[in-house]
Image (tube, helix red, strand yellow):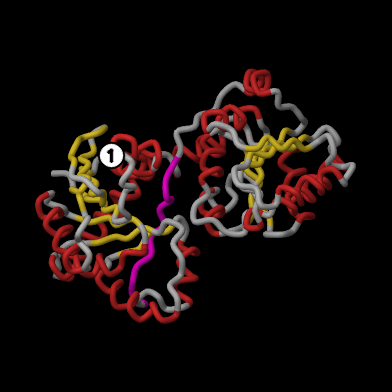
Amino acid sequence: MAMRAVQLNLHPAPADCPPGDLFERWPSLADIPEAVASGGTRVAVVQAAACDERFVRRGVDYRFTDVRGLESVHARGRHYAHLLRALRADVAHVHSLAYGEDVLAISRLLPSLPIVVQDHADRVPRWWQRPAWRRQYRAVDAVAFTAPGLARRFERVKAFPPSLPVVAVPESSSRFTPGDRTAARAFTGLGGDPCVLWVGHLAHGKDPLTVLEGFARLSERLPAARLYCVFGSAPLHDEVTARIEGDTRLRGRVALLGRVEHAQVQVLMRAADIFVAGSHSESCGFALLEALASDLAPVVTDIPSFRELTGNGAVGELWPVGDAAALAEALFRTAMAPPTTGRVRAHFQVELSFAALGRRWASVYARVAAKRRHSA
């Protein structure tokens, strides 16, 4: 019989959002369990909420559970342990590293249940919290990050017990698909040779100013190049605008598109030749996942999550954070020798698709369950 995994979302859903609407607000609520289910695992989701509701959606059993009034960690532990027993969980998959207290309480009540906790851009605990983390995470069988390197900041401060296994599984995947570039360009109005696309906030952590300098250097060699920037929040908007207007290499070659509908991002990616990112750090890199799904060549910073998603640069180019000259060279190499059609998408299908994530999670669950049985 297939293993039964129960995913626990312990961060309460907004009280003003009905369960059926939460899937629009939190896409990963369905994406991750559906990916796991695609690997042959039976999946249930327990979502902390302000109501009790149960339904099945695309083969996944969802339990929205009212946690109002459960103020103590012991009360919450009893509540979640009761649900895990009722669902006959073979493994518990907890989203976010921030709920160690609850995980420890559950483990004490269900000592034979394997528990995996998944990082979702969680912060390293403060110094006074670290002893409690080490105690709480002794109850955990594995922690999952998009890339093992992302665990090092937790390991450096000894937030985890030294024997805790770290597994590499991307936070999510993408449903984007490739499309006809000529048609996409006609629809979007994008042009350029190459046509470079940026998708990310205009913020210090995304480093748009270094990306602009790298692109400016590229334009000296390839004057027909064009850069299009899609972004949400924009604390550096004035600096970015001034940089573009003050540089003849950028003026007329860079377009700030601002916020667009998510479906439009897919069309823009189909129209582009290169996806560029200058992030200093990412817990995953959802825009990069979408680019890979769209068969769009990535030129992205050499950070742990991007190394993992690109197969250590097996597709695309990796460049050092903050190095505009290296970025310009990487963009030029990609423009001169782009990957063959379908190669980036093939990598995505094998390593990063929802089916691939399902297989990865099935393997993780099987390993922690086998290890727990062996220890018993």
Image quadrant occupied by the C terminus: bottom left
Label 1, residues with CA under 10 Å away: few <14, some 14-19, many ≥20: many
Residue 280, quarter of the rendered image: bottom right
78 relative to 54, above or below: below
Q: x and y percent of residue 9 in the render?
A: 29, 52
* Residue at 18 percent of width and 58 percent of height: 80
**Left or right, residue 135 beside residue 227:** left
Residue in the foreground of this view, choosing between 336 and 78: 78
Magenta stretch holds residue 237? no
Q: x and y percent of residue 173 in the render?
A: 44, 42
Q: Amino acid at mark 1?
A: Pro
- Residues drawn in magenta: 162-173
Q: x and y percent of residue 285 in the render?
A: 53, 49
In the picture of the structure, the residue carrying the numbered disc 1 is 19
Q: x and y percent of residue 369 in the render?
A: 21, 59
**Left or right, residue 134 beside residue 108:** right
Residue 307, quarter of the rendered image: bottom right
Image quadrant occupied by the N terminus: top left
